[in-house]
Amino acid sequence: MQLPQFQVHADLEGRHWWFLGRRAIFRTLLTQAVPPSKDRLILDVGCGTGGNTAAFRDLYTCVGIDPSPDAVAFARQRFPTIEFRQGYAPQDCRDLLAKADAVLFLDVLEHVQDDFALVSQLLAGMKPGAYLLMAAPGDPELWGPHDRGFEHERRYSLERFRMLWQGLPVSECVCSALNARLYPIAKLSRLFSRLRGKALGPGQTDLSLPAAPVNALLYRIFAGESKRILRAWR
């Protein structure tokens, strides 16, 4: 990601239905895995501009790390009471990995060339019993200008995603598609984006804030998927 994408994220991630709905789902999953307590540490790897790190600070002690100086500068400016490190995981946060009760790894894998190696290295540094919560863009058929703007390496099918931890000493709690209810709309918008040869929103992204009533409706539809996903927990 470059500065224009970070600026879009910083501007929209506290208001846009996609960011808010996804956080509602992650909040449900996190509290299922880790009982809320300020004594519990959540490490946000690839924290970007800090919105996800800050979203759970009322429940846990949260720390973010990101290799981008621009992203960390945005995060520190927006959330001065939260610790943010500039650096790479796992080498620059081994102390935090060894203590974290859960590690957030959200929308990072698609930027990494060797995603298998990185997942293995993170898991190797985590303490026994900790949880790794991962998310990445799904369905390779949705590839388009938005992905190129964000410098993505790939989009994932569920089968490809599950390959990341096959054979490793971990137990899968749940693996599910997100935004499934709105998938037809997403597919149409990405098709339109490919046909016009450019992303639909600012900063070479498909992110733009709809009218408030539409934004609220889309949030409720998306966030409502948390019940379905939690039922699949095992």
Image (spheres, rainbow, N blue to C red):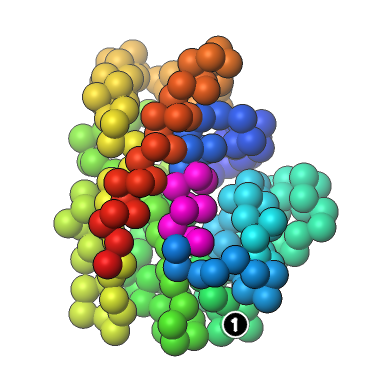
Residue 102 rendering spot, x and y as whole percentages: 51, 70
211 sits left or right of 154 in the view: right
Residue 47 shows up from this direction: yes
Residue 203 rendering spot, x and y as whole percentages: 55, 27
Image label count: 1
Residue 189 rendering spot, x and y as whole percentages: 32, 20
Residue 48 shows up from this direction: no
Residue at horizontal 65 percent and vertical 69 percent from the top:
37
Residue type highlighted by circle 1: Lys
Residue at horizontal 50 percent and vertical 44 percent from the top:
24
Residue at horizontal 34 percent and vertical 54 percent from the top:
230
10 sits left or right of 212 in the view: right
Reply yes or no: does residue 26 show up in magenta.
yes
Q: Judging from the image, what secondary structure is the residue with disc 1 in? A: loop
For label 1, count other residues whose C-alpha is less than 10 Å away and answer few (under 14), some (14-19) or many (20+): some
Residue at horizontal 38 percent and vertical 46 percent from the top:
226
In the rendered image, which residue does mark 1 sit on?
99
Specify the segment rendered in magenta.
Answer: 23-31
Relative vertical location of residue 109 with respect to residue 180 in this rendering, above or below: below
Residue 214 rendering spot, x and y as whole percentages: 49, 16
